Image: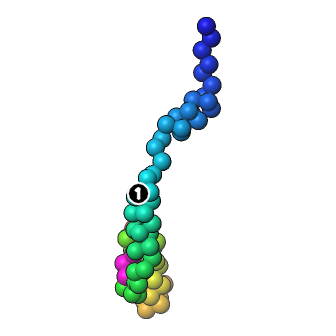
Amino acid sequence: MEKNNDPLKNAFDALKEIDRPTEQQKDKILNHILAEGEQETTLWGKLRDFITIYPWRFAFGVSTIQAVICTLVFGTQYTNLFLSIFGG
């Protein structure tokens, strides 16, 4: 007796066994999505969401602004000082 070990057939058979969401679960998910969409966010709310979702972008942005402002205020001496401290 031959055994069929077709991986695609096994994968599709496994997908058939997964339970689909019930109508109650679908309604709950839809209500949650609609509730999220109805919320009006203020500028501070959007900023907080941006910081919590993309912290590295916020950090690089603040670092860039700080470097530009300090270079404009102190000139190239600030850049040379920064490089001498951290650059070796």
Kindly report the secondary structure that dominates the magenta region of the rendered protein.
Answer: helix
Q: Mark 1 packing: few (<14 Cα in 10 Å), some, or many (20+)? A: few
Q: Nearer the viewer, residue 51 or 5?
A: 5
Residue 86 in the image, given as x and y percentages of width and height = 39, 68
Q: Nearer the viewer, residue 43 or 17?
A: 17
Q: Is residue 48 magenta?
A: yes
Residue 46 in the image, given as x and y percentages of width and height = 41, 81
Residue beneath the point at 40% across and 68% down: 32
Residue 87 sits in quarter: bottom left
Residue 44 visible within the image: yes
Secondary structure of the residue carrying numbered label 1: helix
Q: How is the image coloured?
A: rainbow
- Report the number of numbered marks: 1
Residue 88 in the image, given as x and y percentages of width and height = 41, 64
- The amino acid pointed to by label 1 is Gln
Q: Measured along the vertical axis of the image, is residue 23 above or below residue 72?
A: above
Write down the region rendered in magenta: 45-49
Q: Which residue is mark 1?
A: 25
Residue 25 sits in quarter: bottom left
Residue beneath the point at 40% across and 58% down: 24
Classify residue 3 as left or right of residue 34. right
Q: Measured along the vertical axis of the image, is residue 43 above or below residue 33?
A: below
Furthest toward the top, the residue is 1
In the picture, which quadrant includes the N terminus? top right
Q: Is residue 3 magenta?
A: no
Residue beneath the point at 57% across and 29% down: 10
Residue 48 in the image, given as x and y percentages of width and height = 36, 78
Residue beneath the point at 44% across and 69% down: 33
